[in-house]
Image (cartoon, rainbow, N blue to C red):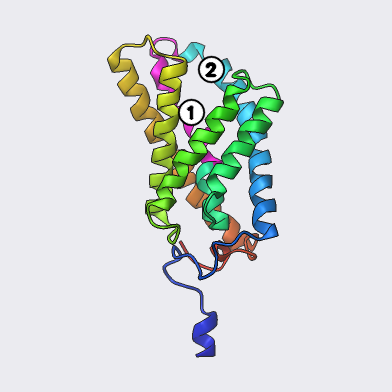
Amino acid sequence: MAEQAVRPSSSGSAAQPGSRRWRTVDIVVTAVLGVAFGVVFWAWGLLWAALDAPFSAFPPAQAVMYGVWLLPAVLAPLIVRKAGAGLFAELVAGIVSALLGSAWGTLTIVYGLLQGAAGELGYAAFGYRRYGWPQALLSALCAGLMAAVLDLVNYYPDWTAGWKTSYVALVALSTMVIAGAGAMALTRSLAASGALSAFASGRTRA
């Protein structure tokens, strides 16, 4: 019985009992993730602007770069396994990006709030009890769709229906690959290194 009690779960996706309560380490790590990605967001915005010209013939194609902006919304819940972690991390990232001088100003904060909330749906759909591939990909898809809709309303309302459809599809694909699969890969790498030993994600296999 003792051996069974300490053996890691083979499924790696089920949350541990009592894990819904936030600990200090959960708050700190989620905040650190948000700040770190806020710097990444700011730098990625500079790269996005610098690459406008290569995509000028078909602007929606630039959406293949989009997934980076949704990574914290998917990654934070995979690591700390707490409801609201994705919203927290994505919002902090948006705030930091705006403070650093994002080209999109304070609207970046609104994006962080709404994208983070949308990303939560991927985990909320499973009662915040499972944190595996299906949840990460669904979280990424929801966050990506929210981001695409926000962009079409705020920046590209005059695009043709074809361009809008292409943009939504490419944002969703980019987000699922970069934010969804990317977050799973990062979580596995961090867990293998022992960096997540304080979390259930570091003691189970996804």
**123 in magenta:** no
Mark 1 Cα shell of 10 Å, populated few (<14), some (14-19), many (≥20): some
Q: In this picture, which residue range is highlighted in magenta?
A: 55-72
The disc labelled 1 sits on which kind of residue?
Met
Mark-to-mark CA distance, 2 and 1: 10 Å
Residue at x 50%, y 34% (from the top left corner): 114
Mark 2 Cα shell of 10 Å, populated few (<14), some (14-19), many (≥20): few
Residue 200, visible in the rendered structure: yes
Q: Is residue 34 left or right of residue 169?
A: right
Residue at x 64%, y 56% (from the top left corner): 26
Residue 109 screen position, x and y as percent: 60, 29
Q: Quadrant of residue 196?
A: bottom right
On residue 136, the disc is: none
Q: Which residue is mark 2?
A: 51
Q: Is residue 206 left or right of residue 100?
A: left
On residue 65, the disc is: 1
In this rendering, the answer to whether 168 lies above or below 30 is above
By secondary structure, the bulk of the magenta-drawn segment is best described as: helix
In this rendering, the answer to whether 111 lies above or below 24 is above
**71 in magenta:** yes
Front residue (pair 94, 9): 94
The answer to the question of whether label 2 and label 1 lie on touching residues, with beta carbons closer than 8 A, is yes
Residue 87 screen position, x and y as percent: 54, 43
The disc labelled 2 sits on which kind of residue?
Leu
Residue at x 28%, y 15% (from the top left corner): 161
In this rendering, the answer to whether 196 lies above or below 48 is below
Residue 112 screen position, x and y as percent: 55, 33
Front residue (pair 63, 119): 119
Q: Total of numbered circles in the picture?
A: 2
Q: Earlier in the sequence, mark 2 or mark 1?
A: 2
